[in-house]
Amino acid sequence: MTARVCAIDPLADPRWDDLVARHPRASVFHSRGWLEALWRTYRYQPVVVTTSGPGPLENGLVLCRVRTWLARRLVSLPFSDHCDPLVDRPDDLAALLGYLRDEVDSKRSRSLEVRPRSAALGGLPAGSAYCLHTLDLTP
């Protein structure tokens, strides 16, 4: 059975804040403040795709719809060093990526860019390589 995927507005849906607060891979780039800054400054429309139904969000992959005179793109997330999908089950991740791949294949968006901290996102072809430099600041 394939999971049903839906899109929500993370600026209007308070369940997104709750997921970000409790998920171990959430970062500042997932936060409402960052998403609002991208919307106010560049008019990049944030959207979260999820397999969760009514009730608390169990997972989510946040992106921005970037519209320029050249193309419409899906980017997770513009001006962010990284942005992990907040997904724990491989089946849910596969459903979310399939939904996004269909959006690109149907030409609703020209491209999809996701920059997780880990290297692979099951089934998506690798594009450009990115380097993430981290510094441990614990004593």
Image: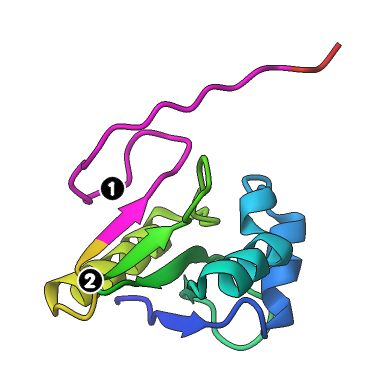
Local crowd at mark 2 within 10 Å, few (<14), some, or many (≥20)? few
Indicate which disc, 2 or 1, sits on the residue closer to the N terminus: 2
Q: Give amino acid for label 2.
A: Ala
Determine the residue positioned at 77% across, 58% down.
21
Name the residue beneath numbered marker 1.
122
Nearer to us of marks 2 and 1 is: 2
Front residue of 68 and 97:
68
Front residue of 87 and 103:
103
Percent across and percent down for residue 63 are 46, 65
Percent across and percent down for residue 60 are 53, 66
Quadrant for the N terminus in the image = bottom left
Q: Which residues are magenta?
A: 112-136
Q: Which mark is residue 58?
A: none
Name the residue beneath numbered marker 2.
71
Percent across and percent down for residue 15 are 70, 77
Chief secondary structure of the magenta portion: loop
Quadrant for the C terminus in the image = top right
Q: Quadrant of residue 136?
A: top right
Q: Quadrant of residue 3?
A: bottom left
Q: Say what secondary structure mark 1 lies in.
A: loop
Q: Is residue 5 magenta?
A: no
Q: Say what secondary structure mark 2 lies in.
A: loop
Marks 2 and 1, how far apart at CA: 26 Å
Label pair 2/1, CB-CB below 8 angstroms: no
Q: Residue lying farthest top?
A: 139
